[in-house]
Image (spheres, rainbow, N blue to C red):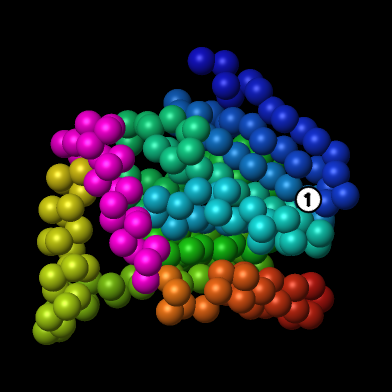
């Protein structure tokens, strides 16, 4: 119950490394801050993604920037929360979180996948707070238009109706059943990754972009 009072601060070559909890709208949000650069980068992770997935990139970025990442309610060690999980709610929570952290503006906002959709909404409402918006494999605001097309494979796997049915089913499972369901699904997806560029290549491309003169010169 006292988690939001705890913070871990470690001095390192990359600057300050802070892991703490911040109370937003009655829920404790897990926050990770690394680096001490004058320019701040805020990372909005994808659906079902942890900021731990970003640690290799965060480690490199922290040499130049202060990097802020967090777990939305229900992720990591953040409270589950009772607010509807909408893009508008995510944007509101992020805005309040950054205000509490007294983040220096303007900052660079990175959004991955669903986090990219949330980042786009944040940019529309708070354009004055951003120096740059970087979208990484982002969900499109016009994604619903795909349902208007005749796409046999996508219609069976990625339509809104399929996703609603899937997550409705997940919501009724107990922890053990859900764990086994997702474990088999992830094993199947991982077997398909051999055809994709290696993760270090993808990370290097993002790092090259972020570390380019266009960003660093501002």
94 on left or right of 56: left
Q: Which residue is mark 1?
A: 35
Is 44 rendered above or below residue 151?
above
- Give yes or no for residue 190 being in the magenta stretch: yes
Is 14 rendered above or below residue 75?
below
| Residue 20 rendering spot, x and y as whole percentages | 64, 32
Q: Which residues are magenta?
A: 171-192
Q: Residues within 10 Å of mark 1 (few under 14, many from 20)?
A: many
- Give yes or no for residue 82 being in the magenta stretch: no
92 on left or right of 211: left
- The structure residue drawn at horizontal position 28% and vertical position 73%, both measured from the top left corner, is 143
71 on left or right of 139: right
Furthest-top residue in this view: 1
- The structure residue drawn at horizontal position 21% and vertical position 68%, both measured from the top left corner, is 158
Q: Nearer the viewer, residue 33 or 84?
A: 33
Is 8 rendered above or below residue 5?
below
């Amino acid at each position: 119950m006292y988690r939001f009072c705890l913070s871990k601060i470690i001095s390192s070559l990359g600057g300050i490394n802070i892991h703490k909890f911040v109370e937003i709208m009655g829920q404790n949000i897990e926050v990770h801050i690394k680096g001490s650069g004058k320019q701040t980068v805020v990372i909005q992770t994808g659906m079902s993604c942890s900021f731990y997935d970003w640690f290799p990139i965060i480690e490199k970025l922290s040499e130049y920037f202060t990097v802020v990442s967090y777990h939305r309610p229900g992720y990591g060690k953040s409270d589950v929360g009772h607010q509807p999980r909408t893009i508008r709610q995510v944007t509101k929570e992020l805005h309040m979180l950054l205000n509490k952290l007294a983040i220096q503006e303007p900052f660079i906002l990175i959004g991955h996948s669903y986090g990219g959709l949330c980042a786009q909404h944040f940019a529309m409402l708070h354009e004055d707070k951003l120096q740059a918006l970087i979208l990484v494999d982002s969900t499109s605001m016009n994604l619903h238009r795909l349902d208007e097309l005749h796409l046999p494979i996508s219609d069976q796997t990625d339509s809104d109706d399929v996703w609603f049915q899937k997550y409705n089913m997940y919501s009724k499972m107990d922890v053990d059943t859900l764990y086994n369901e997702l474990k088999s699904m992830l094993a199947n997806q991982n077997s398909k990754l051999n055809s994709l560029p290696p993760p270090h290549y993808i990370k290097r491309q993002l790092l090259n972009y972020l570390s380019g003169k266009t960003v660093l010169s501002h």
